[in-house]
Image (spheres, helix red, strand yellow):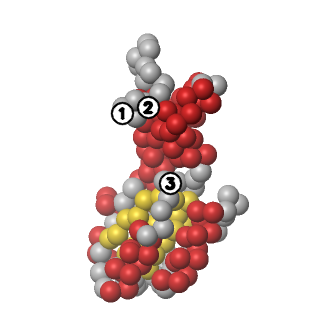
Amino acid sequence: MLGTRRKPFQDSPTPAGNSVAAIVLQRLYGYTNEQSYRDKAEQTMEVLAGLAGQYGIFAATYGIAAIYVSQAHIQVVIVGEDELADQLYSTAGTIPALNQAVLKFASNKVVPQYLPAALATTIPALPGVKEGKTVAVICSDFSCRPPISGVEQLKRDLHLALCRPDYHAPVKKG
């Protein structure tokens, strides 16, 4: 919860502060794997849950925050500088999702200091990435699937990652 004694719950005309805070905390968790961020986001959502139904459309930011907190954050990392890399990036960006971030790196920039903390050890060590090939990698819940080198496969796998709650990544984090 934000450190203000009385913060309005409803969106009018700007998004409600506590709901925005929950979104930010969940995104920070998705990038850092720092559990305290997720705990604070969940706590904020639980405190406000009983009020949401009373506000209808004026609780829209709360609804968006609920999606962020209830679904795993998905990161699509594109590695490469050629036309295929551009196509993979474009494909990943055309699939709308609140819980997704698309990152693109040149092959020589896939090093820990340029990556989100949660991916810093995993991505540089993946097959294909180490060889400097153009690939897309879908990561969810701090695990990554094997690298993808085709646009159609990326579409299919990203759709599964976004639509199936039981979708899991077989390559564990580093």
x, y percent for residue 159: 58, 70
Q: Earlier in the sequence, mark 3 or mark 2?
A: 2
Q: Is residue 137 visible?
A: yes
Q: Earlier in the sequence, mark 3 or mark 1?
A: 1
Tell me if mark 2 has few (under 14), some (14-19) or many (20+) residues whose alpha carbon lies within 10 angstroms of its own.
Answer: some
Could you tell me how far apart the alpha carbons at marks 3 and 1 are, in whole angstroms?
21 Å
Residue at the far right: name it: 166
- Say which residue appears at 42% left-offset and 40% top-offset: 24
The answer to whether the residue labelled 1 contacts the one labelled 2, judged by CB atoms less than 8 Å apart, is: yes
- Say which residue appears at 55% left-offset and 40% top-offset: 63
The quadrant in which residue 80 appears is bottom left
Q: In the figure, is residue 82 to the left or right of 135?
A: left
**Residue type, mark 3 in image:** Asn
Tell me if mark 1 has few (under 14), some (14-19) or many (20+) residues whose alpha carbon lies within 10 angstroms of its own.
Answer: few
Which residue corresponds to mark 2? 11
Which residue corresponds to mark 1? 14
Could you tell me how far apart the alpha carbons at marks 3 and 2 are, in whole angstroms?
21 Å
- Say which residue appears at 34% left-offset and 66% top-offset: 111
Which residue corresponds to mark 3? 99
The answer to whether the residue labelled 3 contacts the one labelled 1, judged by CB atoms less than 8 Å apart, is: no
**Residue type, mark 2 in image:** Asp
**Residue type, mark 1 in image:** Thr
Could you tell me how far apart the alpha carbons at marks 1 and 2 are, in whole angstroms?
6 Å
* Callout 2 secondary element: loop
Mark 3 vs mark 1, foreground winner is: 1
Q: Nearer the viewer, residue 150 or 49?
A: 49
Q: In the figure, is residue 173 to the left or right of 110?
A: right
x, y percent for residue 131: 41, 84
Residue 96's disc is none
